[in-house]
Image (tube, grey):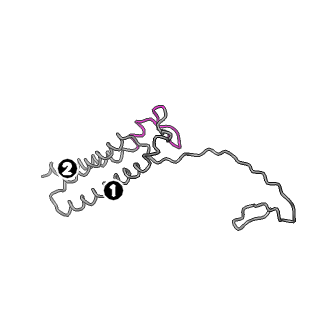
Amino acid sequence: MLLDENNMAVQSEDFYNESVPHKMVVLATPTQPEARTFGIPTVIWGSMAASYALFFFGLILGTGHDGRALFMIAISMLYAVMYFGTAFVLNGLGASVRGKQKSQWIQGKFDTFTGRMSFGAVYGQMLVVPIMFALFGLAIALIRFAVM
């Protein structure tokens, strides 16, 4: 036995002229197949997009009287479009092999590395922040209309 440059043990037939029989042992290891989709149902994507639309709508209603504020809101809207656009493009890249993939939804539950989750749990975990953003934007508009 010798150590190579990475301190990994290697066997050599030339070491002291000893012949070492080579046996190929292949162990089957469980692997996670490549997932080219996010595994997120369309209703969650739609709810997320609607939440951000409500957020921006509330900001425009609440602070839309100022040109500088509108400029900042427009920049933020571009970031949101890039976020959803990137996800849309990446999701479309694997469309040809999507039918061959194992679905992450098994018996009504979403299969994760830590166990299966119900649709309600997935919906709640993924949408709690976007829904709070939507409520925040609408609260800003409500406060502006109450004060003005």
Q: Amino acid at mark 1?
A: Met
- For this orientation, the residue located farthest to the left is 148
Q: Position of residue 73 (x, y in %)?
A: 24, 58
Labelled disc at residue 70: none
- Image position of 108 with respect to 10: above or below: above
Q: Please, what secondary structure does the residue beneath circle 1 have? A: helix
Q: Quadrant of the N terminus?
A: bottom right
The magenta region covers 107-125
Left/right placement of residue 86 relative to residue 3 reads left
Which residue is rendered at x = 38% and y = 52% of the image?
89
Mark 1 or 2, nearer chain start? 1
Q: Position of residue 104 (x, y in %)?
A: 48, 39
Labelled disc at residue 141: 2
* Residue at mark 1 to residue at mark 2: CA–CA distance: 25 Å
Among the 4 quarters of the image, the one containing residue 128: top left
Q: Amino acid at mark 2?
A: Ala
Q: Is residue 112 magenta?
A: yes
- For this orientation, the residue located farthest to the bottom is 5
Labelled disc at residue 82: 1
